[in-house]
Image (spheres, rainbow, N blue to C red):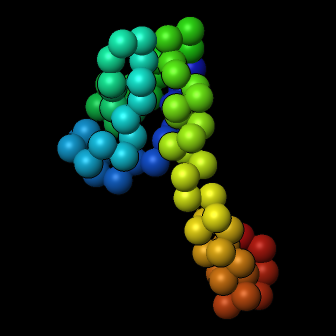
Amino acid sequence: MVQVNSIISCGTGRCGSCRTKVGNKILFSCQHGPEFDGHEVDFDELMGRLNAYKEQEAISEKNWVEEHGGAV
């Protein structure tokens, strides 16, 4: 079992931001999980989705540190 803590926007499964491919199904972490059989999770797809906003997150963190004078 693994816990998939992906980006969750709506918490109802409608927005699809937390979708995770598990076996042959698309499931939503907020609705069907967040715990899934780790042997069934498509980690390549999941990591691609989790890293999609890495650059924007780094810029946002840098801006926050500059504005607040310290680490996050």
Left or right, 47 with respect to 8, comes to right
For the point 33% across and 24% down, the residue is 26
Q: Nearer the viewer, residue 14 or 24?
A: 24
For the point 60% across and 49% down, the residue is 51
Q: Is residue 57 above or below residue 14?
A: below
In which quarter of the view is residue 31 placed?
Answer: top left
Q: Is residue 37 above or below residue 34?
A: above
Q: Where residue 27 appears, x then y in whole percent?
A: 33, 25
Can see residue 4? yes
Q: Where residue 11 appears, x then y in whole percent?
A: 30, 45
* Callout count: 0
Q: Locate the N terminus and report the quarter of the image it occupies.
A: top right
Q: Where residue 10 appears, x then y in whole percent?
A: 28, 51
Q: Nearer the viewer, residue 65 or 47?
A: 47
For the point 36% across and 46% down, the residue is 17
In which quarter of the view is residue 68 placed?
Answer: bottom right
Can see residue 1? no
Q: Nearer the viewer, residue 31 or 47?
A: 47
Q: Is residue 6 above or below residue 41?
A: below
Left or right, 8 with respect to 1, comes to left
For the point 51% across and 19% down, the residue is 41
Q: Is residue 53 above or below residue 11?
A: below
Q: Locate the C terminus and report the quarter of the image it occupies.
A: bottom right
